[in-house]
Amino acid sequence: MKIYNTMTRKKEEFVPIRENKVGIYVCGPTVYDYIHIGNARPMIVFDTLRRYLLYKGYDVNYVSNFTDVDDKIIRRALEEGVASAEISERYIEEVKKDMAALNVMEATTHPKATEEIPDMIAMIETLIEKGHAYEVNGTVYFRTRSFKDYGKLSKKNIDDLESGHRDEKHQMKVSGEEEKEDFLDFVLWKPKKEGEPSWQSPWGEGRPGWHLECSVMSKKYIGDIIDIHAGGEDLIFPHHENEIAQSEAANETEFARYWMHNGFLKIDGEKMSKSLGNFFTIRDIGKKYPLQVIRFFMLSAHYRSPLNFSDTLVESAKSSLERILTAMGRLQDALNSAEDKELTEEEKGFLSKFKDYVTRYENAMEDDLNTADAISVIFEMVKQANANISSENAKAVVLEVYNTIGKFCDILGIITKVEKEILDSDIEALIEERQAARKAKNFARADEIRDTLAAQGIILEDTREGVKWKRA
Ligand code: AMP
Ligand code: ZN
């Protein structure tokens, strides 16, 4: 598979560090509110990457953090008059609900910054020992100039950064950091302020800086070198640049092999912002559209392109998705009534041609996760299925077409299986069969039937007058 690596600004063949294993780290959200639709883009895109790598047979270790200590969380806690942990725990639960509704798989590990403090302290100590960090009055700073490769990801030159801030003394004063050795130095540990959550450390009570958490959590849950590091393009500088500086200075090895960054989501061509009033949470959008439509919409563009969100575009994604779902529903019906029979020559020819779509779909995904092209291949398959496949065909043919389209949608995280409501007459027939099984002392079968019905929300009640049932 080819991946566009932000580090080299080129598409490169993906080669894992450990055979058949992939370690992916995706910078996760700061949990102080519901996530917005922009935050959902990296979640959906990199979940799709994970699903495709799983399809290819890799063992994927997917790590995505929750930033649960941060100024925004503290501010919100003060506004509500509650503890900061109450805010972060509340929104972690809400983010998880949104992710599940977007069919984003749970990460292998979802570390929380507040649970990794000892390892963060250990990394800061290593950086101080190696001369890459220093403490002043309870604050620990990273000595940016001590890391020779600083700027290699964002292609920023240290001297340019410096000249862009000629009034550095003033800047340092504004941010309350005038004790720094150099304007470019950034915070690894900050001292406690009244009312803020804090932890004991060799530099007094305080809390870690944001950049540090990702360096520490990726090391702990993946290793010193990670295969793919991902996030939105706004994170390239300074967040990812600072992560590289911390990790490579501390571990003395390369930090990440491939850097993937998604483009930004805009609303009606404008930047999303609360003050412009064009700021939407996933929760609100979910009231207007099924979230599967939002997922499909996001994947209908290449992940590195900017994506414009508008009702017209989402409506059009909705009707495209419906076309796929209708075809899958039809194939499912055809499958139920198609017969097991020999394939005709025509059917054999059809299937062999249909295999070309598999290659084309895979080629699209292999080309830096081109989901837009992969979706157009699915449309061609749907068109072929609509024109050629019915219950008249041999079951094997219908099954092959149904399974292939279903699998390709599943890689995109699109659910195509239509759960049909079980009919009253079917329920009654099963209850009768259960009674007969019980009479014949075949309790295993009787229980199996009860479980099958329960799985579909049908509850049985054994009464004196016989078995009664209701839908849960
Ligand atoms: P944050 O909570 O702001 O750190 O954002 C969490 C993730 O969402 C990061 O990977 C950001 O780059 C990404 N992100 C934030 N806003 C947008 C947007 N409008 N479009 C795409 N990605 C975004
Ligand atoms: Zn990060």
Image: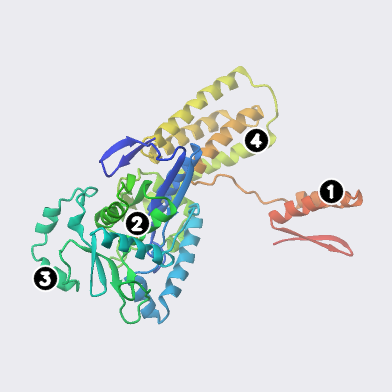
Placement of the C terminus among the 4 image quadrants: bottom right
Q: Earlier in the sequence, mark 2 or mark 1?
A: 2
Task: Give the label, 1 or 3, closer to the camera.
Answer: 3
Q: Amino acid at mark 1?
A: Glu
Which residue does the image show at 37% across and 69% down from the upper left?
69
Q: Tell me the colour scheme of the image.
A: rainbow
Residue labelled with disc 4? 335
Q: Say if residue 297 shows up in the picture.
A: no
Residue labelled with disc 2? 215
Which residue does the image show at 55% across and 20% down from the upper left?
349
Real-space Cα separation, disc 1 to disc 4, in angstroms: 25 Å
Side of 412 relative to 129 (left or right): right
Task: Give the label, 1 or 4, closer to the camera.
Answer: 1
Which residue does the image show at 77% across and 54% down from the upper left?
450
Q: Amino acid at mark 2?
A: Ser
Where disc 4 sits, the SS reads: helix
Choose between 9 and 435: the one closer to the eye: 9
Asked whether the beta carbons under mark 1 and mark 4 sit within 8 Å of each other, the answer is no
Q: Position of residue 60 (x, y in %)?
A: 47, 45
Choose between 464 and 32: the one closer to the eye: 32
- Mark 2: give few (<14), some (14-19) or many (20+) Cα within 10 Å: many
Q: Earlier in the sequence, mark 1 or mark 4?
A: 4
Q: Earlier in the sequence, mark 3 or mark 2?
A: 3
Choose between 226 and 280: the one closer to the eye: 226
Q: Which quadrant does ligand 2 occupy?
A: bottom left
Q: Earlier in the sequence, mark 3 or mark 4?
A: 3
